[in-house]
Image: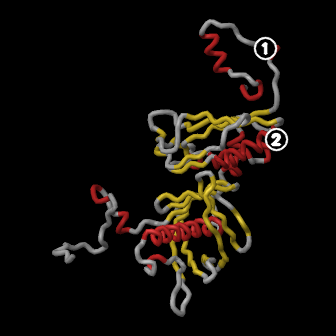
């Protein structure tokens, strides 16, 4: 209402409560353009919209301007409490007509990136992109009527879902190696090389990635020109890329068989989060059993030996 009328209704409420008169009459209000409001919630749409709670490990929003408003009370690092409504924000956009406003809404939803807990952002993208919603054929039974479209059967992880996270992990390791080299007193240390060089052979590396409840094996070949050849089953792809910083955010500039893309990249611990025009993806490196078993006081940077034993003496 505020976007299409150009009025601040909350200010009006405060003024009326203070005994002032309404600044305008109903006939004085002119409606202009079209506006959408999307409510960003910490919930799992695939689990009957079960509310969630937890820390916002990463939070970035579309930059607000005259026609984009983000109403929120949380920041990056805050926690969504289990004792209150799990709404994270209201995202409000305005444009000259419904079609333009809907495009702006979807553009802003893609810029709303959250890591740490499930949200309804991908669902809102799916909902707002449905042909019937775009046509304005919306009723209160829209979701049950189009349930199959809005909640499709999960498919096997696509190649793109795997190549980009695998490349992100490899490039992160390369960056860590470069940081080590810059601080090392031994410029010839083999630990300062991330080229994958081997004498007389090509370096093949086996990676296992977790996508949802599925594990995918990836073979990464380090090529001499700095590119990579990645293989999943019978699929083989030539992959190149680099990570670039822009306004404090990391973007993965990558090319898979010549097809370029630029998703936003967030890596926390051993989990890769990608945000692109297609939505978000989460891929992790499975934790080894001897680390997963760590608990209690030993969990802080500890590990459990696969074979137990007693340390009798340490020779230093």
Q: Secondary structure at mark 1?
A: helix
The image's mark for residue 26 is 1
Left or right of 277? Residue 265 is: left
Q: Is residue 199 visible?
A: yes
Of the image marks 2 and 1, the number of the one nearer the N terminus: 1
Where the C terminus falls, by quadrant? bottom left
Left or right of 113? Residue 35 is: right
Where does label 2 land, which residue?
A: 99
Q: Residues within 10 Å of mark 1 (few under 14, many from 20)?
A: few
Residue 267 image position (x, y, % from top left): 52, 59
Alpha carbon separation for disc pair 2 and 1 = 27 Å
Q: Secondary structure at mark 2?
A: helix
Does 85 appear above or below 128? above
Does 260 appear above or below 129? below
Determine which quarter of the picture holds residue 33: top right
Residue 252 image position (x, y, % from top left): 63, 62
Where the N terminus falls, by quadrant? top right
Q: Residue drawn at (63%, 12%), measured in percent from left and top?
A: 15
């Amino acid at each position: 209402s505020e976007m299409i009328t150009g009025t601040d209704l909350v200010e009006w409420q405060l003024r009326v409560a203070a005994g002032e008169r309404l600044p305008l009459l109903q006939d004085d209000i002119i409606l202009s353009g079209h506006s959408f409001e999307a409510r960003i919630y910490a919930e799992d749409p695939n689990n009957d919209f079960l509310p969630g709670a937890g820390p916002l490990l990463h939070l970035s929003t579309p930059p607000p301007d005259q026609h984009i408003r983000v109403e929120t009370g949380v920041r990056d690092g805050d926690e969504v409490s289990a004792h209150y409504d799990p709404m994270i924000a209201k995202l409000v956009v305005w444009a000259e007509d419904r079609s333009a406003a809907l495009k702006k809404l979807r553009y802003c939803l893609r810029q709303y990136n959250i890591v740490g807990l499930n949200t309804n952002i991908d669902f809102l993208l799916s909902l707002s992109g449905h042909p019937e919603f775009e046509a304005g054929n919306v009723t209160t039974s829209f979701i049950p009527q189009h349930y199959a479209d809005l909640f499709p059967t999960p498919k096997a992880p696509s190649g793109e879902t795997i190549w980009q996270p695998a490349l992100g992990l490899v490039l992160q390791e390369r960056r860590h190696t470069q940081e080590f080299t810059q601080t090392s007193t031994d410029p010839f240390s083999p630990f300062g090389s991330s080229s994958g060089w081997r004498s007389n052979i090509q370096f093949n590396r086996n990676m296992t990635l977790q996508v949802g409840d599925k594990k995918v094996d990836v073979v990464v070949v380090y090529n001499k020109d700095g590119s990579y050849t990645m293989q999943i089953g019978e699929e083989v792809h030539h992959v190149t890329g680099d990570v670039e910083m822009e306004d404090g955010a990391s973007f993965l500039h990558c090319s898979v068989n010549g097809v370029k893309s630029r998703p936003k990249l967030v890596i926390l611990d051993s989990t890769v989060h990608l945000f692109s025009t297609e939505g978000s993806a989460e891929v992790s490196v499975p934790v080894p059993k001897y680390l997963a078993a760590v608990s209690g006081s030993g969990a802080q940077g500890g590990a459990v030996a696969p074979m137990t034993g007693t340390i009798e003496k340490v020779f230093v």
